[in-house]
Image (spheres, grey):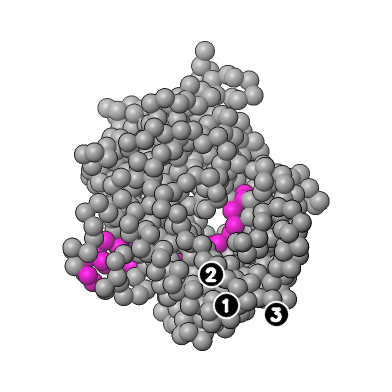
Amino acid sequence: MVTKLNEVDAVVIGVGMTGAMIAKEFTLAGLTVVGLERGPDRRPREESVLPRIRDELKYVQRLELMQDNSIDTVTFRNNSEQTALPIRRWGAFLPGEGVGGTLNHWGGMHWRYLPTDFRIRSTITERYGAGAIPGDMTIADWPVSYDELEPYYDKFDKMCGVAGKAGNLRGQKIAGGNIFEGARSDEYPTPALKPSGGAVLFTQACNNLGHHPFPAPFGAASQPYKNIYGIQLGACEYCGFCGRNSCEANSKVTAPTHIMPALRDEAKFTLRTNAFVSKLVYDRQAKKVTSVLYTDMNTGEEYEQPAGIVILSGYVFTNSNMLFHSGIGEPYDARTGRGVVGKNYCYQFEATATAFFEDKNLNPFMGSPGDRAVIDDFNGENFDHSGLDFLGGGYIRGGSGAEPPIGGRAVPADVPSWGSEWKKETVRWYYHAVEFQNQGSVYANRANYLDVDPIYKDALGRPLIRLTYNATKNDHAMSRYMLTKIDAIIKEMNPTHYELHPRPLNFTIVPYQSTHNTGGTMMGTTPANSVVNRYQQSWAAHNLFIMGASTFPQQHGYNPTGTVGALAYFASDKIVKDYVKNPGPLVQA
C-alpha cells in the first residue's frame, strides 16, 4: 500500500550539489521543500576526519562513495548491434551516492565554458561553412549564452570559493590567467593554488613554445573563506587525497560542507535519505507532474509525495531513466533520428602522457589536482580548424602533485606490474614523474544515446538504463592532434623518458577515464529538438525542472561542473521570480 503524504511546494530528487543548491534557494524564497536522496546522509564531522579519510583502499580502490551497483546500474554496449551487459563494478566513470552525490569525490577542476561553446553549431558554420559539420554529428547551439550565464557563474564561484587567476576581467586580458576565457565580472574568490614542481616545468616549456599557460582553476579555497551562505570554509592543505575522497579541510566544494550546514536547520526543508524514487506521476493532459513515488530502502515502504514543483537533479543516467519510466517525452530512436529523451549522450575524450625526469626531484605526494598548469590554446574554437580533419579540442594540463601512495606510482611501460623489479623501479621513479592530460570534447553523434534495457532490471524491478556509446572518427582525430601538442611540450621539457597514451579504438568501461557524462535530457529551443527549455523546464510538464549535465547538448573541452552550477542558479532564479507567481511554461513552444 502506498502512503500519500501532505503536499509541499517543491520536491527535489537527488540531493547532490545542484539539488542542495536549488533547495537552499527555494527555502530562502519561503518555499517548503522535501529532498529525496537515494543514498545515505553524509556528515563531514563524522566521515571527513583524520585518520579515516586518508584511506586509499577504502575510497579509491573499493569505491566507498559510489553508487551501489547491486541496487541500480547501467548496461553498456558499443553499438546497437550488440547486446548490452550490466556494469557490475564502476570503472570508466564513477556515479556518486548519498547527500552531495558525485561532487563528494570529484577531482575539483572548475571551469566555465567558452562563449563560442554556447553557439558552437553557428560558429562552425560561419567559420568553415555548413558542410564542415558531418551529417551524423548532432551538435546544437545552446539556448542560453555565456553573457546570460556569467552572473550565475560568478555566484557559483563565490559559493564554492574557487581558487584561480582571471585572464579576462571585464574584457581586459590579464597575463598569467586564461586569456581565452569569456569576460569575468570579478576575480576568482581565492588566489590560485601553489604549482607543483611538474607544473613549473610544464609552464616553462609552454612559454618557450609560445603557448599561454595559467594555473588550473580549482573548486576549493586556497585560503580560509566564507561563502555566500555564511559558511566558513578551510584552506586546501595539499594533502593529495582529493580524487574519490571527500575533503578533511572543508575546502573542496561539495554540498555537505558548502550548503548543508545552512540548509539542515531550515524549518521549511526536510531531508529523506535512502529514498529510492521509482516514478513521477504524470498528468499528460494537464502537462504536469502531480507527485513522486519513492521507496524507503530501510523499510521497503512506498510513499507518494505530492508537490507543486518537481526538481529532477539526479546523475545523468538517473534523469533520463526517470523520464523513460514515467512516460514523459518521446524516447530517442537512433534509426530514425526521431524523439529526444536519451538523445545526444556524450562523454569526455581524454588522452594522457607520462614523462620521467631522473635529474628532477619532485614531491608527488603533496598537492591537489589544482596544482597543475594548463593551456587552453587548442580548446574549442580557440584555434583555426581549417585543413584539419576534426572539430573540437580541449585543454592540456601538466603537473606532479596529488599522487597517492598506491595509485600514484608511475613507472615506464616496460616495467613489470608486480614483483621485485616493480618495487625497484617504483622507488627509482616515484619522485621523478610528471603527468599530462588532455580533456577533450565529445561532439554529439547520432549513434550514441541512452534508452531502456529490454533484459536487466534494478532492485525495484524497473528496467535499467542502457548506454550505447563509442568514440567517433572525429573524437580520435581530435585526440591524436592534441597528443602531438603534448608530445611537443614534453620534448621541450627534455625528459629522461616519456610515453604517450592514446585512446583505444573502442570505448571500454573497465579503466577509469572520466565521470563527465552528459546529455540525454538536452536543452533546446523547441519540444521537437529538446527535452527542456533554456530554464531547464520540461516541455512536456511545466512544473518539472531537470538539473545537471544531462541537459547539455554536447560535451565541450572542459569539466562540466562549473556550467552545471551556473545553470542551476540561472534556473532557480527564474523559477523563484516568475514561475512561483505564475505557474506555466516559461518559454512558449
In terms of depth relative to the viewer, which is nearer, 187 or 425?
Answer: 425
Q: Main secondary structure of the magenta part?
A: helix
Q: Which residue is mark 3?
A: 359
Say whether residue 349 is left or right of residue 259: left
Instruction: Find the distance from the CA under tag 3 to the CA under tag 2.
Output: 22 Å
Q: Are marks 1 and 2 in contact (CB under 8 Å)?
A: yes
Q: Tell me if 347 is positioned left or right of 164 in this view.
A: left
Label for residue 175?
none
Q: Which residue position is annotated with label 2?
A: 397
- Tag 1: Cα neighbours inside 10 Å, few (<14), some, or many (≥20)? many
Above or below, 275 relative to 123 = above
Under mark 2, the amino acid is Arg
Residue at 39% from the left image edge and 32% from the top image edge: 83
Residue 117, x across and y down, in percent: 35, 64
Q: Mark 3 or mark 2: which is in front?
A: 3
- The range drawn in magenta is 104-128
Can you give x and y, in whole percent of width and height, for residue 412 in the image?
A: 63, 64
Q: Nearer the viewer, mark 1 or mark 3?
A: 3
In this picture, residue 211 sits left or right of residue 218:
left
- Residue named by callout 1: 202
Relative to residue 300, is residue 74 depicted above or below? Answer: below
Magenta-colored stretch includes residue 118:
yes
Image-quadrant location for residue 275? top right
Q: Which residue is farthest right? A: 51
| Disc 1 residue type (three-letter) | Phe
| Label 3 or label 2, whichever comes before in sequence order | 3
> Which amino acid type corresponds to the residue marked 3 in the rendered image?
Asp
